[in-house]
Image (tube, helix red, strand yellow):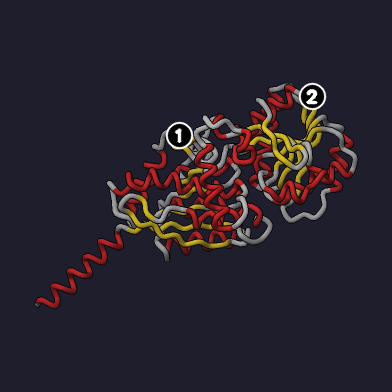
Amino acid sequence: MKRHFLCALLASLAFAANAETVRIGVITSASGPTAVVGIPQKNSAALLPKKIGTLDVEYTVYDDGSDSTQTVALVKKLLSEQKVDAIIGPSGSPNAMAALQFVAEAKTPLLAPVGTTAVVLPMDEQKRWVFKTTQNDALICEALVAHMVRKGVKTAGFIGFGDAYGESWHRVFVPMIEKAGIRLVADERYQRTDQSVIGQALKIIAARPDAVLVGAAGGPTVLPQTTLVEKGYKGQVYQTHGAATPDFVRLGGKAVDGAVMAASLMLVLDEVPDANPSKKLALDYIGGYEKLYGSKPATFGANVYDAGLLLQRALPEAAKKGQPGTEAFRVALRDALEGLHEVVGTQGVYTMSPADHSGFDRRGRELMQLQGGTWHRVAE
């Protein structure tokens, strides 16, 4: 009898201990066309908090190879086999769009470190389970278009990815420039894996726009700008925050010098005032990353790191309403994330709401220009 009692007690204690362990899945594109984004995100998973309050946090990290089909398979595995309480990832916008249905059905929050606003807007029953740890396109685009207006731009061209990222940017950019009195005279697309955009570049040059916006992310951001410059384009080239990577500068060289972009303060941290609430956190993150890997992270890694900061605030609130591993806990976690207010991250300050699952305001962007291989702040 005593033996049975002891076994039952041990089982109960084991269950209680297990119930205090939160399981988080992390999916990044550490290989394939989006690797320049996914590698610093995968690396940043090692910096995520392992203990939050009384909760132990375990992370299962996967690489989807930049393949949306593989993303879905890994999401299903995390949900059905690992029984995760939340997922951070994936790296690519098309990959995140492919995952929406499955996280919503499982009532599991997804913290998406992707560019496209389409993962959270327009809000619906699927997207209410998604929280975005990058700036929304409109926030970035406002700064770029305002710069165009100040520089007297009257006509513009657009070349972007033929996927969710590029189309999301096109939907934001075109109405915004039209409202500003700027006419779109060239409109082109290309794929992330394309090796040449000469045809598209020549069409843009023939239209003679004053400025061109490249709606792309990661390594492929370089190709349109270098091609335009090589073919003689003399106008101003703008980039989205998808170009916020050391590889953009390294691969583009002199051909990308002069590019204007709005992105995270991490790229111009030395020029950011100490009063900026995110500066210290950004320095801490960069320092931790350098200690582990011997190099500075691309800003994309900070998107994953900030997901950890959001979870640090939300997980203890969720634990008041349910045990990890249960639907009640996941629902409470979703609600807690949606209720976050003035949470300082490495790239800005997050205030979520039922209508806004990105949460950034103007504190989440810096306007900058590449000069001599270094990004410098530009006054807005």
Mark 1 to mark 2 CA distance (whole Å): 35 Å
Secondary structure under the numbered disc 2 in the rendered image: loop
Residue 230, quarter of picture: top right
Extreme-left residue of the structure: 1
Give the x, y percent position of residue 325: 34, 58
Please tell me whether residue 287 is drawn above or below residue 5 in the rendered image: above
- Quarter holding the C terminus is top right
Secondary structure under the numbered disc 1 in the rendered image: loop
Give the x, y percent position of residue 337: 41, 42
Crowdedness of circle 1 by 10 Å Cα count: few (<14), some, many (20+)? some
Please tell me whether residue 164 is drawn above or below residue 155 in the rendered image: below
Residue 134, quarter of picture: top right
Q: Nearer the viewer, residue 241 or 77?
A: 241
47 vs 53, left or right, is: right
Give the x, y percent position of residue 42: 56, 57
| Residue in the image at 42% along x and 66% along y | 81
Please tell me whether residue 266 is drawn above or below residue 40 in the rendered image: above
Q: From this viewpoint, is residue 203 visible?
A: yes
Q: Earlier in the sequence, mark 1 or mark 2?
A: 2
| Residue in the image at 52% along x and 41% along y | 346
Name the residue beneath numbered marker 2.
154
Name which residue type carries label 2: Lys
Crowdedness of circle 2 by 10 Å Cα count: few (<14), some, many (20+)? some
Give the x, y percent position of residue 238: 74, 36
344 vs 301, left or right, is: left
| Residue in the image at 47% along x and 34% along y | 355
Name which residue type carries label 1: Thr
Q: Which mark is residue 351?
A: 1
| Residue in the image at 71% along x and 50% along y | 247
Q: Nearer the viewer, mark 1 or mark 2?
A: 1
Q: Which mark is residue 206?
A: none
